[in-house]
Image: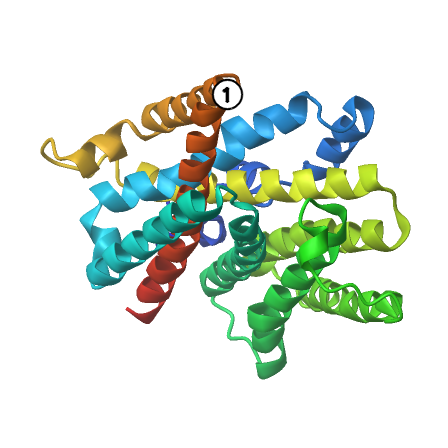
């Protein structure tokens, strides 16, 4: 993920607490409209149009976006170029070996599911930490641990709990005797405590972070409760909403960084072209990846399988690269 920089030219310092602007952050980063996604899924049902758009034109493009940006932007590779190359080769080798040895990618799909869960959790925790830094407030030990690790473990737990409703349910240990409901209710203490503390101590400088925390906390709390009390359609609705939230949030977070520098760029390098024509390039990437995926799935089986393999490689590489880039920039 990129470093967050102020986009607004307003002199009011409260405006600088937002990553881009109040409207942009609420819509595209905090995704406050996510309950509407549940309504759409409930009306249209499983395997609906929203699933088509989510898979081909939202989730897949945001993964390929990371590969594009790291390949072009030297700043993202600074200090970790060797690690990026090694991880790319190792993941590609792993997929090739598994693909040609067994012909199945289900076991790697399990790896993707688990790694994706931690990736979701880390991204929410990371963006929340950016908002905290923007607010200028120094967190106490409790709030620091809650927002850094509590958020990660809660979201990771929620997504793994929903594994019983996925294709990979047989790969996870089933303990019917274990009081999962008690564990679930205990885990709900994390988002409740987070929201209570954010709201109780909210100031104008911390309003963006509070809105963001309440939005994703309520989403994953509902996700967990759907596993506990709901139906499969409810679980699917929350899973779809969480995936769309994550992908749009990521693309918006990246967009505010490149859009910030578009008027400062000089020359005609690949990076300056990205900065000057960011939204056009992003739209082309989304359309291209979505169209290729849709076409491949409707083509011959070997073409569909090849695209699935490439998409899985892009997903795993996205997780690895994004984690290394975020850690590298946090240490600078």
Q: Residue at x 71, y 26 (%)?
A: 47
Q: Quadrant of residue 323?
A: bottom left
Display colour scheme:
rainbow
- Asked whether residue 6 is in view, the answer is no
Left or right of 181: which side holds 291?
left
Question: Could you tell me which secondary element the residue under label 1 belongs to?
Answer: helix
List the residue tagged with mark 1. 294
Number of labels in the image equals 1
In the rendering, at what x and y percent does residue 142 appear? 63, 80
The crowding category of the residue bearing disc 1, from other C-alpha atoms within 10 Å (few below 14, some 14 to 19, many at least 20), is: some
Residue 309 falls left or right of residue 121: left
Q: Nearer the viewer, residue 283 or 134?
A: 283
Position of residue 36 measured from the top left corner of the image (x, y, whole percent) = 74, 32
Residue at the extreme front: 101
Q: Is residue 231 visible?
A: yes
Residue 168 lies left or right of residue 325; in this view the side is right
Identify the residue at image location x=60%, y=55%.
Answer: 207
Where does residue 101 sit, x and y in percent of width and height? 43, 48
Q: Which residue occupies the foreground of this view, 110 or 43?
A: 110
Quadrant showing the C terminus: bottom left
- Residue 305, relative to residue 156: is it above or below? above
Give percent across and percent down for residue 170. Answer: 71, 54
Residue furthest toward the bottom?
A: 141
Q: Nearer the viewer, residue 193 or 71?
A: 71
Please indicate whether residue 68 sits to the left or right of residue 298 in the image: left
The structure residue drawn at horizontal position 55% and vertical position 48%, both measured from the top left corner, is: 109
Residue at (73% x, 64% y) in the render? 173
């Amino acid at each position: 993920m990129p470093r967050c920089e102020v986009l607004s030219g307003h002199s009011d310092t409260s405006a600088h607490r937002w990553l881009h602007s109040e409207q942009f952050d609420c819509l595209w980063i905090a995704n406050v409209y996510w309950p509407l996604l549940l309504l759409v899924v409930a009306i249209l049902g499983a395997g609906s149009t929203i699933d088509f758009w989510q898979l081909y034109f939202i989730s897949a493009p945001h993964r390929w976006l990371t590969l594009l940006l790291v390949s072009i932007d030297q700043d993202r590779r600074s200090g970790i170029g060797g690690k990026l190359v090694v991880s790319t080769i190792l993941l590609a080798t792993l997929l090739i070996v598994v693909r040609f040895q067994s012909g199945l990618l289900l076991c790697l799909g399990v790896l993707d599911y688990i790694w994706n869960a931690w990736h979701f959790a880390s991204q929410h925790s990371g963006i929340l930490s950016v908002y905290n830094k923007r607010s200028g407030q120094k967190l106490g030990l409790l709030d620091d641990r809650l927002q850094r690790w509590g958020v990660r473990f809660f979201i990771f737990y929620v997504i793994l709990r929903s594994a019983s409703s996925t294709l990979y349910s047989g790969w996870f240990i089933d303990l019917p005797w274990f009081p999962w409901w008690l564990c679930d209710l205990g885990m709900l203490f994390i988002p409740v405590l987070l929201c209570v503390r954010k709201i109780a101590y909210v100031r104008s400088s911390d309003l963006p972070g509070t809105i963001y925390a309440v939005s994703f906390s309520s989403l994953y709390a509902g996700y967990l409760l759907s596993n506990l009390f709901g139906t499969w359609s409810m679980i699917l609705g929350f899973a779809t909403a969480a995936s769309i939230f994550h992908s749009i949030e990521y693309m918006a977070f990246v967009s505010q960084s490149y859009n910030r520098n578009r008027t400062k760029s000089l020359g005609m390098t690949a990076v300056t072209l990205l900065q000057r024509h960011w939204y056009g390039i992003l739209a082309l990437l989304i359309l291209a990846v979505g169209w290729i995926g849709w076409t491949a799935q409707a083509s011959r089986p070997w073409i569909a399988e090849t695209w699935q393999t490439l998409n899985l490689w892009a997903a795993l590489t996205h997780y690895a690269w994004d984690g290394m880039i975020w850690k590298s920039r946090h240490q600078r």
